[in-house]
Image (cartoon, rainbow, N blue to C red):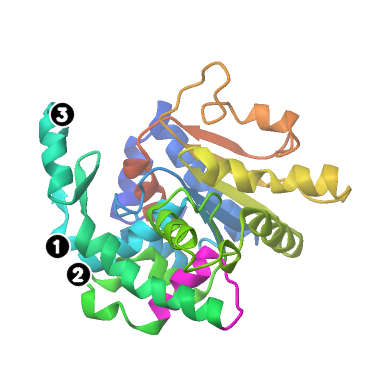
Amino acid sequence: MKKRNTISAFMEKNFLHFNSASLVDAAKGYEKHLSEGGKMMITLAGAMSTAELGISLAEMIRRDKVQIISCTGANLEEDLMNLVAHKHYKRVPEYRDLTPQQEWDLLEKGLNRVTDTCIPEEEAFRRLQKHIEKIWKDAEAAGERFYPHEYMYKLLKSGELEQYYEIDPKNSWMLAAAEKNIPIIVPGWEDSTMGNIFASYCMKDELKPQTVQSGIEYMTYLADWYVKNSEGRGVGFFQIGGGIAGDFPICVVPMLYQDMEMENIPFWSYFCQISDSTTSYGSYSGAVPNEKITWGKLDVKTPKYIIESDASIVAPLIFAWLLEM
């Protein structure tokens, strides 16, 4: 039997029942999937970048434990914001007790709250804006179009942000992804701060919407990637949270099978979701994995795991298992 290091050994000894057992089962399933030559997509909903998932996810990327990521526009940008403005963040552990007036006071100080963490407007949002604006406008002037994540990659690779780094860059998952140039799917990017800012430039006739490639183009981009990477052991689906980050990419399989009539396209070959959304009427985020069989997303034999818990606790533990910590 393989000898485990400290964290993994603790999990193997203590995580024996309920959600903790599901966590270990999912980690072992992920490990087996990769060892058999499979590839893995990780999807990021919620505010996982602000929760500093990059501390463990960046190393997962560097060690080839993830081959493609789907995330919200917020997670795309908030990892960069944490990279350049971390020392200006404010933690509010008593957030449950804040009055509406105290919330308003935070707004007036330029502190946008995400649960117990406030993101600084000037040092985070505006610091990125003045650099990404030039990249958008240069692309449009050259008649070029790129995906949201590609603009972020250009920004990181330009070195313009290095002057602001306030964390160890090895803890930025976006920087690790840019260095590896792994594909990122960002559905609904316009529902993000940078997306809102870009829309404002379009309204002022300073930019054209088509300068940023669209969600439909992301779907065709993902479809092409999936066809090229789903042979053999196939592609697994590791979903953190719910929402569009997971709903959008998982649909690529039934789209290819039913609408493109690719009858031999493989189903997702592993599925795990970490979510605190419990099963309820009409909830897709809280739907059990078997419901996805009826939509042509998962096979009857696809290994399926649900961990009903806080992803900011669970995901780093699974990553620690995979990184043999």
Q: Nearer the viewer, mark 3 or mark 2?
A: 3
- Up the image or down, 131 lies above or below 204; here it is below
Q: Quadrant of residue 314?
A: top left
Q: Is residue 149 magenta?
A: yes
> Which residues lie in the magenta part?
142-157
Q: Nearer the viewer, mark 1 or mark 3?
A: 3
- Dot 3 falls on a residue whose secondary structure is helix
Real-space Cα distance between discs 2 and 1? 6 Å
The C terminus, quarter of image? bottom left
Q: Is residue 57 left or right of residue 34?
A: left
Q: Position of residue 174 (x, y in %)?
A: 41, 66
Structural crowding at the residue carrying mark 2, measured as other residues with C-alpha within 10 Å and reported as few (<14), some (14–19) or many (≥20): some
Residue 87 numbered tag:
1
Where is residue 263? Give x, y as percent: 88, 47
Q: Earlier in the sequence, mark 3 or mark 2?
A: 3
- The residue lying toward the viewer, choosing from 141 and 25, is 141
Q: Inspect this view and state whether residue 324 appears.
A: no
Q: Earlier in the sequence, mark 1 or mark 3?
A: 1
Residue linked to disc 2: 166
The reply to whether residue 32 is visible in this rendering is yes
Q: Which residue is mark 3?
A: 100
Secondary structure beneath dot 1 equals helix
Q: Mark 2–mark 1 contact, CB under 8 Å?
A: yes
